[in-house]
Amino acid sequence: MLVDDQAVVRAGFRVLLEQADDIEVVAEASSGSSAVAVAARLRPDVICMDVRMPGGDGLTATREILADAPESPPAILVVTTFDLDEYVFGALESGASGFILKDCEPEDLIDAIRRLANGYGLVDQVVTRRVISEFARRRPAAPPESAAAHQLTPREAEIVRLLAKGFSNNEIADALFIETSTVKSHLGRAMTKIGVRDRVQTVVWAYQNGLAAS
């Protein structure tokens, strides 16, 4: 589903995405409020969401869409011209699964949608490290107690902690002397326990709940 107040942008994205055999554009919306209504009716797998739109901004729409579908939420990819921290962090804290700039290459947009559809979050490489650093800076001095955190095994907690520090699966495997497949298994179980659907929201959760403190 494409959400952008500019018809020419939606048309351009549609042309690009329809070149991919495994992606179908099922709907469009021109405002945040209409996006909420259409998403509730069609339940798309992935939503490409603009940030600044008249008639309801993309961050508010993101929160409402995810709140309306707690069991099977769509993955929301925020697509914007603004490489600004307030939009990056606002999108991720609203529950978005990824963030990419509008001037990205067409294949990067297609790859991002595929990644989100398969449960992998994504942040544009230009801002990835800064996002993690800023979450670390914003970490509350006394994070709220999380019942989900106590459900994690020590190994799951350690893997989530390393993920929040920016480690890839291979780097986590090397650091813990385990197989990459084992990392994926532990991380999958941890994500189920804490109620997130992708790596990006796992990082957000870790910082919000103090699991990235050490």
Image (cartoon, grey):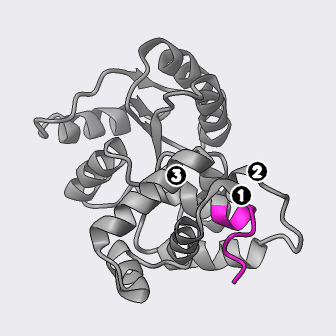
Q: To which residue does mark 2 refer?
A: 147
- Which three-letter amino acid code belongs to the residue tagged 2? Ala
Residue drawn where x is 77% and y is 72% of the image: 139
Frontmost residue, 24 versus 175: 175
N-terminal of the pair, mark 1 or mark 3, is 1
Mark 2–mark 1 contact, CB under 8 Å? yes
- Please tell me how crowded label 3 is: few (under 14), some (14-19), or many (20+) other residues with Cα within 10 Å: many
Q: Is residue 53 visible?
A: yes
**Residue range corresponding to the magenta coloring:** 206-214
Magenta-colored stretch includes residue 21: no
Depth check, mark 2 against mark 3: the one in front is 2
Residue drawn where x is 75% and y is 69% of the image: 210
Q: To which residue does mark 1 refer?
A: 150
- Which three-letter amino acid code belongs to the residue tagged 3? Met
**Position of residue 160 measured from the top left corner of the image (x, y, whole percent):** 55, 68
What quarter of the picture does the C terminus occupy?
bottom right
**Main secondary structure along the magenta-highlighted residues:** loop
Q: To which residue does mark 3 refer?
A: 191
> Compared with residue 115, is residue 62 higher up or lower down, i.e. above or below?
above
**Position of residue 22 measured from the top left corner of the image (x, y, whole percent):** 15, 36
Magenta-colored stretch includes residue 213: yes
